[in-house]
Image (cartoon, rainbow, N blue to C red):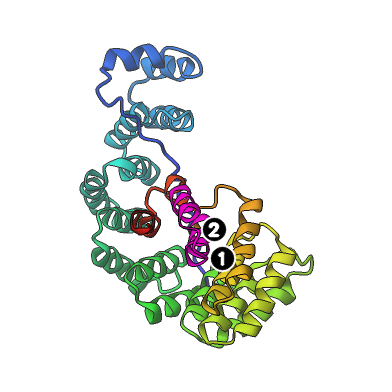
């Protein structure tokens, strides 16, 4: 079975707020090293698209996406090559996904066979919270290339956002079938199995542990713990969370899951001790501070609980539960 693996250009792009720079400001920048030599070449041969592309890549690498965008656009206007359109699409996607969508739709009309551009289009829809449209684009790609790995992985990601567990698992299973050596994607499949109480979580975790000859990966052990939590076997869950921590003492979620088992069993001192261990590993771990607050509140330590909730919220301003607990505690 032939597997088509396409790697997207990096989208790690920081779009500048300085979009009001005028051409003169760009000209001054582009006349300086390390751009000057390419700029001089462009001056002599202004119709060479490859020169604009080279300068765009260099600008982008130096976190100057706005002038890079202008150069990518110029290269594209001279010659409709896929890498130039990808450069434009990636930069627009970061801060202007609606503009990315409009550009990519046109670019795909010019280059209808480009899978790169279609995947970017799907991501632009997703960035605008139009996940159904993004999934449709993925399905269109997979209709002609059912083994397109990046598209399958993206479809799984999109279906997970829609809480479509069966669809997510089906896509990840196909990915895992195609590239069983990809640890990151195998881990995602393990987690999905565990969250849906599927015993395949244990089988896949065991396979991953056997492959880990150096015994450095804690993810399969943690997933086993999650599976047992979700299926109500707390004894085995605690055993595997302990093994997770033994293999990687910085595996913070294992402390939280272990502590939550004690908390739900009304073993508050044991729970508190576990959460406190987590903040000795990382004092900025907001979840641990929140659960410390929960334990303190049950022990009648209201003032301390309030401080712990405040700490959790100060570390993570999106932590709504911590904010609400902080406001309710008296």
Q: Is residue 60 left or right of residue 281?
A: left
Q: Residue at 72% across / 73% down in the picture?
A: 211
Q: CA distance from mark 2 to mark 1?
A: 7 Å
Residue nearest the viewer, comparing 165 with 167: 165
Q: Which residues are magenta?
A: 289-311
Residue nearest the viewer, comparing 18 with 11: 18
Instruction: Tell me whether the residue at label 2 lies in contact with that at label 1, contact meaning CB atoms closer than 8 angstroms.
Output: yes
57 lies above or below 290: above
Is-magenta flag for residue 294? yes
Q: Secondary structure at mark 1?
A: helix
* Circle count: 2
Image mark for residue 288: 2
Measured from the top left, where is residue 315 in percent x and y?
A: 47, 46
Circle 1 is placed at which residue position? 256
Q: Residue at 28% across / 63% down in the picture?
A: 134
Mark nearer the N terminus (2 vs 1): 1
- Please identify the quarter of the rendering in which residue 262 is found: bottom right
Residue nearest the viewer, comparing 266 with 54: 266
Is-magenta flag for residue 113? no
Q: Callout 2: few (<14), some (14-19), or many (20+) C-alpha neighbours within 10 Å? A: many
238 lies above or below 83: below
What is the chief secondary structure element of the magenta stretch? helix
299 lies above or below 232: above
Q: Secondary structure at mark 2?
A: helix
Q: Residue at 46% across / 57% down in the picture?
A: 302
Measured from the top left, where is residue 57 in percent x and y?
A: 45, 33
């Amino acid at each position: 079975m032939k597997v088509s693996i396409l790697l997207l250009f990096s989208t790690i792009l920081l779009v500048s707020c300085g979009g009001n720079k005028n051409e003169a400001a760009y000209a001054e920048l582009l006349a300086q090293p390390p751009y000057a030599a390419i700029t001089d070449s462009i001056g002599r041969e202004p119709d060479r698209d490859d020169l604009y592309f080279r300068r765009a890549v260099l600008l982008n690498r130096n976190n100057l996406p706005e002038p890079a965008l202008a150069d990518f656009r110029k290269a594209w206007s001279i010659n409709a090559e896929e890498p130039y359109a990808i450069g434009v699409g990636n930069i627009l996607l970061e801060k202007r996904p609606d503009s990315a969508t409009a550009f990519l739709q046109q670019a795909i009309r010019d280059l209808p066979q480009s899978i790169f551009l279609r995947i970017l289009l799907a991501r632009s829809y997703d960035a605008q919270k139009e996940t159904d449209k993004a999934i449709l684009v993925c399905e269109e790609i997979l209709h002609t290339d059912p083994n397109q790995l990046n598209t399958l992985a993206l479809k799984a990601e999109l279906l997970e956002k829609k809480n479509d567990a069966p669809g997510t698992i089906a896509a990840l299973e196909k990915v895992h079938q195609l590239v069983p050596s990809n640890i990151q994607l195998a881990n995602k499949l393990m987690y999905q199995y565990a969250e849906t109480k599927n015993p395949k979580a244990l089988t896949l975790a065991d396979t991953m542990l056997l492959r880990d000859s150096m015994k450095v990966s804690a993810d399969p052990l943690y997933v086993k713990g999650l599976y047992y939590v979700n299926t109500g076997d707390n004894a085995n869950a605690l055993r595997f969370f302990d093994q997770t921590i033994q293999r990687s003492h910085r595996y913070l979620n294992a402390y939280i899951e272990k502590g939550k088992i004690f908390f739900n069993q009304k073993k508050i001192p044991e729970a508190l001790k576990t959460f406190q261990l987590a903040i000795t590993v990382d004092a900025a771990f907001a979840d641990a501070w929140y659960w410390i607050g929960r334990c303190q509140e049950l022990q009648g330590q209201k003032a301390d609980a309030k401080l712990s909730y405040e700490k959790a919220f100060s570390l993570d301003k999106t932590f709504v539960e911590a904010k609400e607990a902080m406001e309710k505690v008296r």
